[in-house]
Image: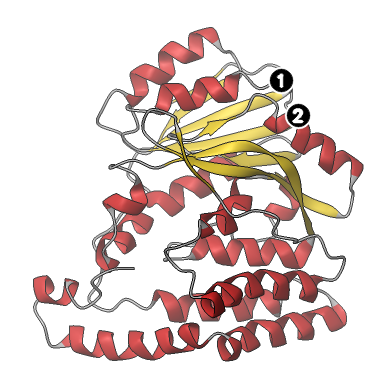
Amino acid sequence: METDRVTALPRVSIGLPVYNGEAFLEQAIRSLAAQTYPNIEIIVSDNCSTDRTAEICAALGEAHPNIRYSRTERNLGAAGNFNRVAELATGPYFAWANHDDLWDPTYIEKAVMALDRRPQAILAYAQSAKIDETGDTIIVLNARLGLDAPDPAARLKRYHDLFIDIDRRRAWGKEAIEGFWIPVYGVIRTDALKRTSLIGNYISSDTILLEELLMLGAFHEIDERLFFKRDHRKRSMRDSEGYDARAEWFTGKRATRLIFPRWRAFRERMRAALSLPAGRDRLRCAAEMAGFYLRRRSEANALVKEVIANGGRLFLGPKRAAEVFRKW
């Protein structure tokens, strides 16, 4: 079922995938509908919710004709639903939105202005903070990522260096590194996004997507805090912490006995590096992808751990197998 009341071709498509998001959905949609940039569409893809999601969207759709509500016929998993809203987009610019986050009213306007002024940039995102259930700021997320170099391999190396530097400082759990993934919620040139593999149905596929986009163009960071990532008890990151649960969240299907997301990420990194950039950039990006596993010991160790853990899962029952990977 789809309700489409948009009459003019939008310039920015905002895709909001949702499953049982009644607690914060209305606040999220209202913050998108309040954007100062007028030429937008808001695409809500309801992944077979069983709560009041459809009712909330119907009520908001009456007040905001640029909202498109569509319900899937079956649960596509988180990855499938995120990709669905991207495929439904009609504007030359696209942005993903979560059902529980908030956006400053000027976010889209300032991001579009940044991209219009910078043809070499394919993504513009704002600095961000984490908020609680009531909307109060918990912590400011890491920013000033510096992903605007003209060279694809240099942008890729800079992104990898962010993680390596955290390792060197032993800052895991001490710094708000969730800011490293915030660009995925920026405004993206739709044609560039469609050259990527979008969100894969495996753990950490959003990181791979950002790396794919970095090989295609520069990221521009807006030097203002305009995006607010909500942290709450039912947030997907908290509700699906186990390896098996996270795999099921991505796919919408029961986890298989063998799970190799780290090896899948390695394969997708190399595939992207050998297909997206052109000429010499292709080899340089591939070298950086492979080098990342040599420079960051934890990434290489994770590949070994995954082989050993899956070997153990082969000889255990389903319940005990799920305990092998205790936490992502």
Pointer 1: residues within 10 angstroms few (<14), some, or many (20+)? some
Which residue is found at the position 36% from the left and 58% from the top? 251
Q: Quadrant of the N terminus?
A: top left
Judged from the image, the secondary structure of the residue bearing numbered disc 1 is: loop
What residue is pinned by disc 2?
Answer: 109
Q: Which mark, by number, is residue 36?
A: 1
Kind of residue at badge 1? Thr
Question: Residue 199 in the image: x percent, y percent?
Answer: 52, 57
Question: Residue 134 in the image: x percent, y percent?
Answer: 38, 28
Question: Residue 141 in the image: x percent, y percent?
Answer: 55, 50
Count of marks placed on residues: 2
Kind of residue at badge 2? Glu
Answer left or right for 36 relative to 75.
right
Q: Residue furthest top?
A: 63
In the rendered view, would you say 244 is above or below 86? Answer: below
Q: Quadrant of residue 226?
A: top right
